[in-house]
Amino acid sequence: MDKIRTALVHDWLTGQRGGEKVLEVLAEVFPQAPIFTLFHFPGSQVPALERREIRTSFLERMPFVRSRYRSYLPLFPLAAELFDLQDYELVVSTSHCVAKGVIPNPDALHISYIHSPVRYAWNQYSAYFGPGKLGPLSRLVVPPIIHALRVWDVASAARVDRFVANSAAVARRIAKYYRREADVLHPPVDTDFYTPGPSDARGDYFLIVSALVPYKRIDLAIAAADLSGFRLKVVGTGPDLKGLRRRSGRSVEFLGALGGEDLRRLYREARALLMPGEEDFGIAAVEAQACGTPVIAYGRGGALETVVDGTTGLLFSELNVASLLGVLDKFRSFPCNRETLRAQALRFSRTVFREKLEAYLRARWTEFKGAR
C-alpha cells in the first residue's frame, strides 16, 4: 500500500498516549505519508515519529500554545478543515477530537480510527463541566462553545467513509452520536516490552497509570485509599493534579509522568492496577496484565473487553467509593496467575494489531477501488 498517495491525520502530538501508539503503527505501514496535526511539541514523540514529515496548523504559532492549548478549543475545527489534503488518494485519521473532520479530496477514501467521540462534548460532558465545575464566566461561555462543537462534530462525520473504533464501547458511541456503524480494532500494546519480572514478589501498593482528568475518576481511588489506608501510587499528569493532591492523604503518592523501565517495574511489583473510571479501551490495563499484574476496574466501557472478571482481575459495578472498597476487599483472596494474565494481554499485541490493521486497510481500499 506504500504506492498509494496517503496522508495521516492526528489531533495533536504532545505526549505518548494510546492514540500515538496507533499512529506509530500507521507510520510504519505508510512510511512516506506526511502527518498532519494541529500542533506538535518537538521531543514529545518516539524518534520514529519525530523523524517524519509533520505538518502543523496555524495553531502551532499561537501564543502560549504549549501550556494553554486547550484554550484554543473553539478554533480546533477550523484548524482541521484548513489542512490541504486534495493531493491524497487515502486519508487515515486517528481522532479523539477533531482529526476526523478534515476535508479530503472527493475522490479519496477517508478511514477514521476513533479513540472516542469528543469526550467533553458527549458522554463525559458532566465530568468536565457539570455542577460545581465552572466559574460564573465559564458557565456563560462553555455551554454554547460545546454545543457548537457537537453540531460540527456530527456534521463532519459525513466526511468519513469508514469508521474504526478502538473498542465495542466506542463503536456504540459512534452509532449513538453519529448514527454510523464502526468496525472494531483494538489498539496495540507493546507486549514485547511489558513482560513479567524475574520474580513474582509484590510490593504493598496499588497503582494507577492515567491522565489526570475528571472522567478517569481518580478521586474515587484516593477516597478509598484514605478510608482504608492502602498505599496508592499514581503515575501521570494532567489538569486535575493540584486538586487531587489537595484531597490526598499520606498513603497516596504522585509520581508524575514515567515511562520505560520505571513504569514497567511499577507494573510488575504492584498488587494490582486500579482503573476507577470508565475507559474507552484502557491500554494501561493490558500493559499491567502483560507484566503479570491483575486489574481492578469499573465494569463499563473498555474494561469489559480487556479484563476477564474473576480471572485476570475484578470489576466493580457502581461508580462510588463503597463499590470500589467492596471489590478491594474481595481482591484479598484473588488467585493471581501470571501465565493467564500474560495470555490475555497477548491478544492485544503490537504484532496482532499491525496484521489486522494492514488486512483491514487493504480490504477497504480494494472495495473502494472496485466500486468506482
Image: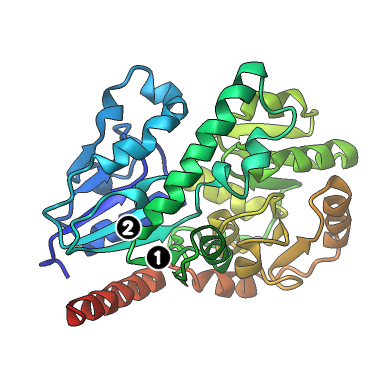
* Location of residue 162 (image quadrant): bottom left
* Location of residue 30 (image quadrant): bottom left
Q: Residue at x 70, y 35 (%)?
A: 130
Task: Give the number of the disc on residue 213.
Answer: none
- Residue 113, horizontal then vertical, whole percent: 39, 60
Density class for disc 2 (Cα within 10 Å; few <14, some 14-19, many ≥20) is some
The amino acid pointed to by label 1 is: Phe
Q: Residue at x 61, y 17 (%)?
A: 137
Q: Is residue 26 above or below residue 85?
A: below
How many numbered circles are shown?
2
- Residue 288, horizontal then vertical, whole percent: 59, 58
Q: Residue at x 25, y 41 (%)?
A: 50
The C terminus - image quarter: bottom left
Q: Residue at x 17, y 70 (%)?
A: 1
- Residue 189, horizontal then vertical, whole percent: 46, 61
Q: Please indicate whether residue 237 sits to the left or right of residue 47 in the image.
A: right
Label 2: element kind? helix
Q: Please indicate whether residue 4 sits to the left or right of residue 345 in the image.
A: left
The amino acid pointed to by label 2 is: Arg
Q: Is residue 224 above or below residue 293?
A: above
Quick check: can you spot residue 323? yes
* Location of residue 87 (image quadrant): bottom left
Q: Is residue 301 above or below residue 45?
A: below
Density class for disc 1 (Cα within 10 Å; few <14, some 14-19, many ≥20) is many
Residue contact at pointers 1 and 2, CB within 8 angstroms: no
What colouring method underlies this structural image?
rainbow
- Residue 159, horizontal then vertical, whole percent: 32, 57
Label 1: element kind? strand
Separation (CA) of disc 1 from disc 2: 10 Å
Quick check: can you spot residue 96? no
From the image, tell me which residue sits under label 1.
163
From the image, tell me which residue sits under label 2.
159
